[in-house]
Amino acid sequence: MLKATAAMIITFLVYFVGAATANPSTPNQPPLPLAHTYTQGLNIKDYWLSEKLDGVRAYWDGKQLLSKQGNIYHAPAWFIANFPSQPLDGELWMKRNSFERIVSIVRDKIPGDGWQDIRYMVFDLPLKKVAFSARISKLKNLIATLNSPYLHLVEQSRVSNHDALIKKLDEIVAAGGEGLMLHNGNALYLAGRSHDLLKVKSYQDAEARVIAHLPGKGKFKGMLGALQVETDEGKRFRLGGGFSHHERRFPPAIGTFVTYKYYGKTINGLPRFASFLRIKALK
């Protein structure tokens, strides 16, 4: 993972504090499909499989790139020069384990040269009354006609059963990937969370708000020891692991929302073996 400078991290945190307190929606908010978490038992043969990219979700409305909440990503004119008038749904991405670097590039209102390293990885074509399998076929044909080095199609494949799915998941995770996505081939492009779109991970993740910084001890003396966080349901617990040295020196600000990973829940409903994953993605 690329290391950020202290100045960049401070700016990064200030941005997210502002994002967390901003108006939760805008007139440009795109109608995006959202994923549930995969559980064993569904008919996997009905689903397409792709890698879950650790980038920033972006909706191309035919003129500009928008975040989940409708905020504009100010991409350079040369980056979107050959994008189609047809809306697209995808991820701004560089490579595995580059999330912080991507965010530091796309958040700027005045775009810089860092956009040269970013690709818009497209995984869906927002068309009404067209099943996902047909949309993928149309998307392949569309991208093949475009001459853009920054526009790429996310690879879609099939697996026959749960064991094959887990084997593929293990391969992706071993290679540094985050997980997998499953998309029902018969599903229409509809806004909101549904089981037609599923994320597959070796762990679960969720979000919580930072309410306190707990001081470190021993080798972490003078730095962050743990974050005290609170969920939307009012559950409070500590995140003591998963931080880089820089993140312990410059921890997420009070009020910031963070994503944490965990492995099931305790009898009291608290996340088991919870650890910090990253600051909540851009909105």
Image: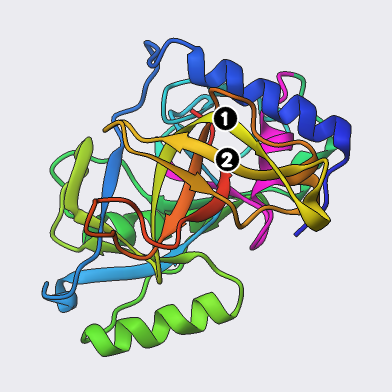
Which residues lie in the magenta part?
A: 89-109
* Amino acid bearing label 1: Ala
Q: Quadrant of the N terminus?
A: bottom right
User: Does the magenta run of residues contain 203?
Assistant: no
**In the rendering, at what x and y percent does residue 53 appear?**
51, 58
Q: Which mark is residue 132?
A: none
Q: Amino acid at mark 2?
A: Leu
Q: Residue at x 52, y 55 (%)?
A: 275
Across and down, in percent, residue 204 comes to: 36, 60
Q: CA distance from mark 2 to mark 1?
A: 6 Å
Residue 35 lies, in percent from the top left, at 28, 50
Between 229 and 68, the one lying in front of the other is 229
Mark 2 sits on what residue? 227
Q: Is residue 221 left or right of residue 67?
A: right
Tell me: 212 left or right of 111: left
Check disc 2: other Cα within 10 Å, few if <14, some if 14-19, many if 20+: many
Q: Where 255 sits versus 79, above or below? A: above
Give yes or no for residue 107 being in the magenta stretch.
yes
SS class, disc 2: strand
From this view, report whether residue 119 is shown above or below residue 201: above
Q: Which residue is mark 1?
A: 212
Q: State yes or no: discs 2 and 1 in contact (Cβ < 8 Å).
A: yes
Please tell me which residue lies in front, 89 or 280.
280
User: What's the residue at 29%, 79% (across, down)?
Assistant: 158
Residue 152 falls in image quadrant: bottom right
Instruction: Say which of 240 and 194 sits in front.
Output: 240
- Count the marks: 2
Residue 38 in which image quadrant: bottom left
